[in-house]
C-alpha cells in the first residue's frame, strides 16, 4: 500500500548531523516541525551508486532549503559507519561533509515502515516528499541498480507549493513559471488548446 496521502511514518533513531555530532534520538517529526521534508533511503554506506546519489542530494540541499524543504537520509548502517563515510574524502570514495542528517536504521524498522526494505536486508532507493502537515505527497522507489534524479524532487517541491498556493493542478512536465491547469473540463480543454504540442 502506498504511503501517498497518508501521514509519513515518524521515527526516532541515532543520526549523524550536518556538523558531525551524533544525535542519539533524532526524531523526524520534531526535525521537520512545519517544514517540507525529503526523506530518502539508500542501501548501504561505502557502496557504489549510493555516494553519487548522496552527493547529488547534498549539491541541491541549499536549493531545497530555499523552498523550506529539509533533507534526511536513511540506511541500515550504523551512525558510526555514516560518520566514517563522511570523514572519507570524495576522491577516496567518501562523502565529505554532507549537510543533512544521516539516520542509522540498524533495526530496519524505518525502511520497513516506509515499505522499502528488500529481502529483510537493505532499503531500496526510496524518496518521499512530505508536506508541512506531515503527509506524504510523493513516493518514488527505484531498484538497487538505478540511481535517482534529484532534480525531479526539486521540481515536485515546486509543483506541490504551486498547487498549495494557487489551487491549480500541474500537468505533465510542469516546471516552475509554467502554466498550471484548473481541475475542470474547461480547464483541461483550455490548457490543451494552448499547450498540447509542448507535451
Image: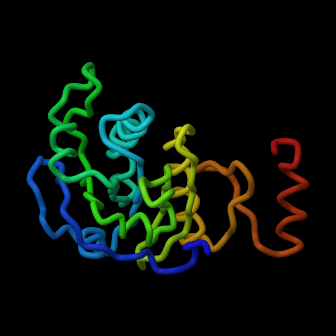
Residue 14 is left or right of residue 10, and the answer is left
Q: Residue at x 16, y 44 (%)?
A: 83
Image quadrant in which you'd find residue 72: bottom left
Residue 100 is left or right of residue 160, and the answer is left
Residue 159 screen position, x and y as percent: 58, 59
Residue 99 screen position, x and y as percent: 24, 45
Observer-nearest of 191 and 172: 172
Q: Residue at x 20, y 58 (%)?
A: 15
Residue 132 is left or right of residue 115, and the answer is left
Residue 106 is left or right of residue 20, and the answer is right
Question: How many numbered circles does the render carry?
Answer: 0
Image quadrant in which you'd find residue 5: bottom right
Locate the C terminus by quadrant.
top right
Q: Residue at x 57, y 39 (%)?
A: 146
Observer-nearest of 160 and 51: 51
Residue 123 screen position, x and y as percent: 44, 54
Q: Residue at x 10, y 56 (%)?
A: 22
Residue 101 screen position, x and y as percent: 24, 54
Amino acid at each position: 500500500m502506498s504511503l501517498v496521502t497518508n501521514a509519513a511514518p515518524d521515527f526516532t533513531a541515532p543520526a549523524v548531523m550536518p556538523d558531525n555530532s551524533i544525535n542519539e534520538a533524532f526524531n523526524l517529526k520534531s526535525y521537520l516541525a512545519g517544514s517540507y521534508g525529503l526523506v530518502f533511503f539508500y542501501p548501504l554506506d561505502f557502496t557504489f551508486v549510493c555516494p553519487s546519489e548522496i552527493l547529488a542530494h547534498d549539491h541541491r540541499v541549499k536549493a531545497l532549503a530555499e523552498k523550506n524543504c529539509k533533507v534526511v537520509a536513511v540506511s541500515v548502517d550504523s551512525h558510526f559507519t555514516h560518520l566514517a563515510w563522511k570523514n572519507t574524502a570524495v576522491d577516496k570514495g567518501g562523502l565529505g561533509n554532507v549537510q543533512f542528517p544521516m539516520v542509522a536504521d540498524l533495526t530496519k524498522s524505518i525502511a520497513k515502515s516506509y515499505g522499502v526494505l528488500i529481502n529483510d536486508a537493505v532499503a531500496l532507493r526510496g524518496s518521499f516528499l512530505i508536506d508541512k502537515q506531515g503527509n506524504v505527497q510523493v513516493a518514488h522507489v527505484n531498484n538497487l541498480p538505478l540511481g535517482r534524479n534529484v532534480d525531479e524532487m526539486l521540481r515536485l517541491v515546486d509543483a506541490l507549493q504551486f498547487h498549495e498556493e494557487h489551487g491549480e493542478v500541474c500537468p505533465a512536465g510542469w516546471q516552475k513559471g509554467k502554466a498550471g491547469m484548473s481541475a475542470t473540463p474547461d480547464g483541461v480543454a483550455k490548457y490543451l488548446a494552448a499547450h498540447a504540442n509542448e507535451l
